[in-house]
Amino acid sequence: MAEIKSHEFETFLQKSARNYRIFVIYGPDRGLVSERAAQLAGKTAVALDDPFSLTKLDIGDLQKDPGRLVDEAQSIGLFGGEKLIWIRGAANEKYLVDPLALLAEKPLEATHLIVEAGDLKRGSLLRKTAESARSIMTIPSYADDSRALNTLIDAELSAEKLGITPAARQALIALIGGDRIASRNEVRKLALYCRGFPTVEEHHVTEIIGDASAISVDDAVDAILSGDLNGFLHAMQKISSSKTAIFLVLQACLKQFQLLDTMRAEMEEKRLQAPQIMQTMGRHLHFRRKPIIEQALRQWTAEAIARESNRLQAAILQSRRRQVLEDSVAMQTLLSTTLQSGRKSA
């Protein structure tokens, strides 16, 4: 078995990544999965701007041609040298898993293979295949905890020779997380805004990342979970009027669904009811929000929560890659989630 913990990735990247040619990177944080895939690609010494050396495939490409992965991996590059096959959007597709198992049996000589996958449960087909093969390094990628967020903040701000006050750091951590690429972009935006100042202050964080109160964002998320279309539109109008980034609602909604996912897993594992879970895992919630979360736990299945979390993750990633469409992507996604909640409560 070749597997590391999520927090061990940086050490692995510097010390051991060169010992492997096949990587399966998975997790609920799509931004972190994508970022780590790019970092591993940079360690392969393959010219990433050379179309003859780099082959990027979506999982749908393999569905159309199941034998393509093996053919690509075993073929010799047009001009020789090392090459990289980079697959995105994987889950547990048999037309990926079977070729991957075949390639793992014999070490690749001049080919590197990186597979980006979503949140794979333990025992799922792709994860089981990757973890059981010594030649495949399996890399879980989970949403940043406070330690990882602090490291990210320090790295980005130190690059601009900026310090940050404790109050500003606390305010910033409360507004980021859930998606690595989105978090990094927000900190970079803050650093750019504060260029020329020696230290980032709390008011800088409020001014550039969002000056709406957390209550306004919570109102929007609560309306989404309740399927309250009018309440959602009203909350979004307030947020828009305050010039707060709509992206913050998208991010807060994702965090809420991640909490629901954890609660739902606990319910099913211990065979508990929603009120029992709320007494333990929901103690930190504001009393006004508890009935809404409890109702959502009753209405949303584990599978539906996972699907919605993945959809929100994808929207966050899309909004960061194409920032000109950020507001429309966020609004369309949140509206769809609101309508889904409304149908479940009907």
Image (tube, helix red, strand yellow):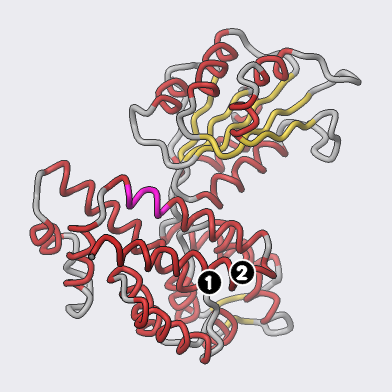
Q: Quadrant of residue 193?
A: bottom right
Is residue 202 visible in this depiction of the protein?
Answer: no
Residue under pointer 1: 247
Depicted 327 relative to depicted 100: above or below: below
Image quadrant holding the N terminus, namely: top left
The numbered disc on residue 326 is: 2
Q: Is residue 308 visible?
A: yes
Depth check, front residue: 63 or 34: 63
- The x, y position of residue 156, in whole percent, is 63, 64
Residue drawn where x is 45% and y is 50% of the image: 310
The residue type indicated by label 2 comes to Glu
Label 2 close to label 1 by CB (< 8 Å): yes
Magenta run includes residue 197: no
Q: Where does the magenta region start and end?
A: 304-309
Magenta stretch secondary structure, dominant? helix
Q: Where does the image place residue 49, in percent across and percent down from the top left?
A: 84, 40
Amino acid type for the residue under numbered disc 1: Phe
C-alpha span from label 2 to label 1: 7 Å
